[in-house]
Image: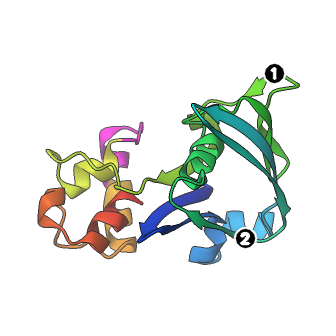
Amino acid sequence: SYRRFLVDSYCGHIGMCCVFDESVFGQDEFSREVGIMSVDIAVKKYFGDFTLDIQFQSQDNRIAVLGESGSGKSMLLKCIAGVMTPDEGHIIINDVTFFDSGKNIHLRPRQRRVGYLFQNYALFPNMTVEKNIGIGLREKKETKKKIVASLIEEYHLEGLEKRRPAELSGGQQQRTAL
């Protein structure tokens, strides 16, 4: 299971991205063990005429980054998740170095154990809810089936298992993607 979640959302001209530890969803064994989330980020990413240049540290379980459209919030989340590689700097979460240009460290996205919820939810339109949820699981068929059923119950998607994304509300699509 993922240990950290990244959520990217957009409303009007102001967008928000959040980074949070799964402890915000409830106290599980991992959350009790880790306690707080430690974040140390200092990255630069050059993208055409735009340069993302951000530095911050936090000990909070939830971090929100607000800014105008085009200010680099989504780019920051993509760098944390490993979908995009910064040009310079470092990303350290809970004392695990995800990226460090000076030390030539670049963990692959799967090694980061980060769940990333895109603005458009990135669901496969031709797949059902249960297939969209299970697509990233590498477990054996029966184990995968149990995990998917558990997630469907946890995110209140019961009765929607055979529906496709176009048949879901925005909130149902978001919970499926999460």
Residue 8 spot, x, y in % from top left: 50, 60
Residue 54 spot, x, y in % from top left: 76, 50
Q: Quadrant of the C terminus?
A: bottom left
Could you tell me how far apart the alpha carbons at marks 1 and 2 are, in whole angstroms?
Answer: 28 Å
Numbered badge on residue 104: 1
Q: In which quarter of the image is residue 68?
A: bottom right
Q: What residue type is labelled 2?
A: Asn
Question: Residue at 37% across / 72% down in the picture?
Answer: 155
Q: Which region of the structure is painted magenta?
A: 136-145
Relative to residue 85, is residue 129 drawn left or right?
left
**Does residue 144 belong to the magenta stretch?**
yes
Q: In this view, does 20 lie above or below 135?
A: below
Q: In which quarter of the image is residue 59?
A: bottom right
Marks 1 and 2, the one that precedes in the sequence: 2
Residue 67 spot, x, y in % from top left: 60, 65
Who is closer to the viewer here, 112 or 144? 112
Does residue 1 appear anywhere in the picture?
A: no
Mark 1, Cα crowd under 10 Å, few <14 / some 14-19 / many 20+, is few
User: Of helix, strand and loop, which one carries label 1?
Assistant: loop
Question: Residue at 21% across / 72% down in the picture?
Answer: 169
Residue 15 spot, x, y in % from top left: 51, 66
Q: Name the residue under label 2.
A: 61
